[in-house]
Amino acid sequence: MNRRHFTRALGAVAAGAALPRALFATDASRHFAAAPPRVNGTRLNAALTALSEFGKNPQGGVTRLAYTAPDLAAREYTKARMKEAGLDVRVDGVGNIYGTRAGTNAAAKPIIFGSHVDSVPEGGNFDGPVGVFGAIEVAQTLREQNITTMHPLEVVVWQNEEGGTWGSHLITAERVTAAELATVSRGGLSIAAGIRALGADPANISAARRARGSAHAYVELHIEQGGTLDREKLDIGVVEGIVGLRQWEVTIEGFANHAGTTPMDGRRDAMLSASRFIEAVNRVVRAESGRQVGTVGRIQAFPGAPNVIPGRVVCTLELRDLDDAKIGRLYDAVRAEATKIGAQNETTFAYSPLVTHESARCDDRVRALISAAAKGQGFSTKSLPSGAGHDAQNLARICPMGMIFVPSVGGISHSPREFTRAADITNGANVLLDVVLRLDAATLA
Amino acid sequence: MNRRHFTRALGAVAAGAALPRALFATDASRHFAAAPPRVNGTRLNAALTALSEFGKNPQGGVTRLAYTAPDLAAREYTKARMKEAGLDVRVDGVGNIYGTRAGTNAAAKPIIFGSHVDSVPEGGNFDGPVGVFGAIEVAQTLREQNITTMHPLEVVVWQNEEGGTWGSHLITAERVTAAELATVSRGGLSIAAGIRALGADPANISAARRARGSAHAYVELHIEQGGTLDREKLDIGVVEGIVGLRQWEVTIEGFANHAGTTPMDGRRDAMLSASRFIEAVNRVVRAESGRQVGTVGRIQAFPGAPNVIPGRVVCTLELRDLDDAKIGRLYDAVRAEATKIGAQNETTFAYSPLVTHESARCDDRVRALISAAAKGQGFSTKSLPSGAGHDAQNLARICPMGMIFVPSVGGISHSPREFTRAADITNGANVLLDVVLRLDAATLA
């Protein structure tokens, strides 16, 4: 995409020709008489490049953990870009950044769209920022095109997505517990201390809360962190929903003993049981058809010396699927296998829940709008679940929610090698722009 | 055992009656006319209890890593006990403590016996100290009984056994490399810095060296760190040799990726390969008959987050057997299995040697003496290999070597739960005493 696309001079023949005219002939048509507006892809991608300096790694990615200095610096840069886009910037009571643009109807519920700018350790430059800067670019384009929506628009930067979608959780949860606020995030601060580091005050959490029904819709543009769109050479993913996720810490107890003097048949080797557990997770998850996944990502043996049979192994188990009931069935099956494994060498398995996120379905009407907007611009699309968690799953608690995916090369994410082509980012922002306008015209209540 | 055993008043009828009279009628008989001498078990066990205060843990064991403050304090206590036993105490050029007792023939080669006082982290009170204080008790008993051997006696405390039998290695190795001296021991100091911490000077290593043929024999009393003697209710283990040991660091490379978005069949999961590797080690080691053992004691996954498929796993592999060639065969078989495992999911295995200790056979003549001494005192015995490494394996480089084992309850070692009964410790010291006297009378050259 290039500058031509957002000049009114282009006329109705070019990109706009692919739009469903019927829709634009009704409500959406009030926004523009000639060609539909298009974002400035060059400016959008330049902003992403500029952002990649904050927390930059030698490998080319970023380490921008929430609440750390690079995160704070990236947020300041983002606020400045929001202001340039004509947005009224404020930080809410938990540290989320909102950039608001008034609508023609002050009583109308806002349309919220955005993402996050924090990263995992040694993460990439696209997971989060594409959605934030895509949203800012949409706002700036509307301003430049003198398009005012009926609904107020709110571009949002959620705080600490990678640590567990905290910013969106804190303002959509029924209640926030003291234990949650005491959780220590990967950057070293608790959530409460992090809120303060962002210039907000944990005492104001309830004031920041957004009630069910208080927003018209939430839509988030994001890279597809799997490789489906890239592998199938598709432009836009229309997200069906965000899979549920459950994580446990699994403790396997055997008996630590001398690795030289304890015969093989006299061992209660927690490591051997752990190895059979990991294999069983893989076997159980693959046993049924579907897109469920199961992972053991962390492991530690105690005492952890080459010459001592491990008496204890602690590892994690994570299961994800769009169907929460299926996650429960898989968990039961894994535990049944583990019990058998433990009986083989007198080891025991214990499970402690770490994280539970229920699956969140995207709103069917929002999905239809995204699909229509993408197809209207001539893009190839695919409906797919999001295997990764996103702030959107929390927003589904309070309003109709949808997500737009753009391809990530090789499906690589949470890595300095994460990469999304500039053209795909521009495409995604143009779909987002169109979706915001279509949402503005739609009755969703 | 009690005080009665080492008084000459006892006469020849009691414990001495079980001794092979033929042997005592010849050379050994020169030491004592009536009952054979016996150690003071009460004093010996009291010294062990006193030693257990240095580095004491709440769990009842000790953490007395070489070169740390508790190790230094334990060494000072040991030196004081040596002096009480009438030994001439000196520290050699690498920090080993020798307590010497002159023999009647100043030209005769010394008989060396002892063990170590350092421990593993959260270790027990018997692994090492039983041999050191058993040896001191033997020297003190000989003094009290006015028995002077022909050979000089040297009671030894080897420095840093648990970190890799360093003290005995440094004085018996053909050559010591700079890389060895730079090795960082578990207490935090390098071997060179550790030598200095013990009041010695690494510049004097060559002066401390003991040449091949320079000692009459080396004998070490130690707890059996397996459970064989305890399980079979036997008094004394006659050690056949110390098993060879090889350790490797194994690095399994796959590809780190998002645990939510990467389908099961698109993963190059290093953790899954690691689990199959651990299972294969167990299968290969058990596939042949024999007493060989194989252990994976340490493991780490990278990046090590519950929600990331591990792209790399690093673990250890240790193999031990009395036959070094068998260790080599097992290693080859494990590697062949690993190659097949790697092919299943595009992961690779690489091996980096950590430690190699060749097996060390005990001297047949010393073994026979130990067996005769134990049987002569009416003890039940068993010949068995040592699955654990000991300083004795290094002494085998320079002189005939033997080891005496006493039972460890449940075979537990390297743990605060390590326990050897006082009576068994006294039995072991009495066998050691008898063996020293028999060695003194024996021609081994």
Image (cartoon, coloured by chain):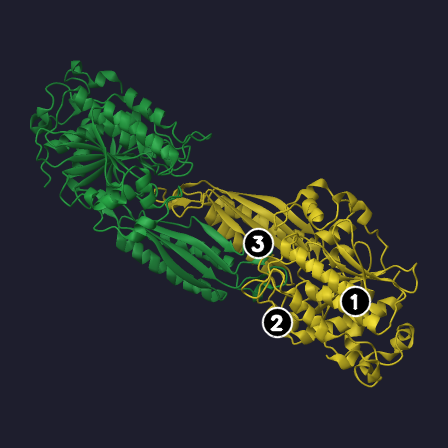
Chain colours: A yellow, B green
Residue A64 in the image: state x and y as whole percent: 62, 57
- Return the residue found at the far bottom: A13
User: Which of the two discs, 2 and 1, labels the residue nearer the N terminus?
Assistant: 1
Whether tag 2 and tag 3 are in contact, CB under 8 A, the answer is: no
**Discs 2 and 1 share one subunit:** yes
Classify the position of the C terminus of chain B by image quarter.
Answer: top left
Q: Quadrant of residue B71?
A: top left
Give the labeled residue for mark 1: A85
Res A409 label: 2
The reply to whether discs 2 and 1 touch (Cβ–Cβ < 8 Å) is no
* Farthest-out residue, top: B9
Determine whether A356 is above or below B411 in the image: below
Q: Secondary structure at mark 3?
A: loop
* Amino acid on which the number 3 mark rests in the picture: Ala
Q: Which mark is residue A253?
A: none
Q: Nearer the viewer, mark 2 or mark 1?
A: 1
Q: Is residue B36 above or below residue B126?
A: above
The kind of residue tagged 2 is Val
Circle 1 packing at 10 Å, graded few (<14), some (14-19), many (20+), is many
Residue B305's tag is: 3
The percent coordinates of residue A147 (x first, y second) are: 87, 71
Where's residue B152, x and y in %?
A: 14, 32
Can you give x and y, in whole percent of width and height, for residue B49 in the image?
Answer: 35, 25
Say which chain tag 1 marks: A
Residue A391 sits in quarter: bottom right
Q: What residue is drawn where x is 29% and y is 24%?
A: B44
- Dot 2, how many residues are within 10 Å of its Cα: few (below 14), some (14-19), or many (20+)? many
Number of numbered markers: 3
Q: CA distance from mark 2 to mark 3?
A: 22 Å
Dot in front, 3 or 1: 1
Q: For this view, does A383 lie left or right of residue B225?
A: right
